[in-house]
Image (cartoon, rainbow, N blue to C red):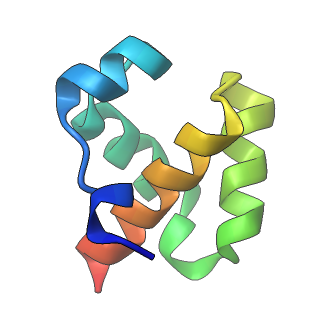
């Protein structure tokens, strides 16, 4: 996987999801995403927030890499 996959800007994320990266990080923290399977987090973002699959995966990967 290329680093560019999760190395996205706020501008890109807002355009595709309606929220800034910091907002998604708060949402993922509240969800406890660091302790969940990444596929479950992706599904949650898609289901609860209508985030397109690519962006749900990107946000999840970005989040998990930032916590590593």
Q: Give the residue drawn at x 46%, y 19%.
A: 16
Asked if residue 10 shows in the view, the reply is yes
The quarter of the picture where the C terminus appears is bottom left
| Residue 17 coordinates in the image, percent (x, y) | 48, 20
Q: Is residue 40 left or right of residue 1?
A: right
Total marks in image? 0
Location of residue 41 (image quadrant):
bottom right
Q: In this view, does 7 lie to the left or right of 36?
A: left
Q: Give the residue drawn at x 27%, y 37%.
A: 21
Q: Give the residue drawn at x 39%, y 39%.
A: 24
Q: Is residue 32 left or right of residue 10?
A: right
Location of residue 35 (image quadrant):
bottom right
| Residue 15 coordinates in the image, percent (x, y) | 36, 13
Residue pushed farthest front? 2
Location of residue 3 (image quadrant):
bottom left
| Residue 46 coordinates in the image, percent (x, y) | 73, 35
Is residue 61 depicted above or below 28 in this figure?
Answer: below
Instruction: Judge by depth and name the residue closer to the eye, 54 or 42.
Output: 54
Q: In this view, does 8 lie to the left or right of 30?
A: left
Asked if residue 6 shows in the view, the reply is no
The quarter of the picture where the N terminus appears is bottom left
| Residue 7 coordinates in the image, percent (x, y) | 24, 55
Is residue 7 depicted above or below 50 in this figure?
Answer: below
Instruction: Judge by depth and name the residue closer to the eye, 6 or 23.
Output: 6
Instruction: Judge by depth and name the residue closer to the eye, 66 or 3.
Output: 3
Instruction: Judge by depth and name the residue closer to the eye, 13 or 37.
Output: 13
């Amino acid at each position: 996987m290329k680093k560019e996959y999760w190395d996205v800007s706020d501008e890109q994320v807002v355009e595709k999801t309606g929220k800034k990266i910091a907002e998604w990080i708060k949402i993922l923290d509240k969800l406890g995403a660091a302790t969940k399977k990444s596929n479950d987090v992706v599904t949650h973002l898609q289901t609860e927030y209508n985030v397109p699959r690519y962006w749900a995966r990107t946000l999840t990967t970005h989040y998990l890499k930032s916590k590593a």
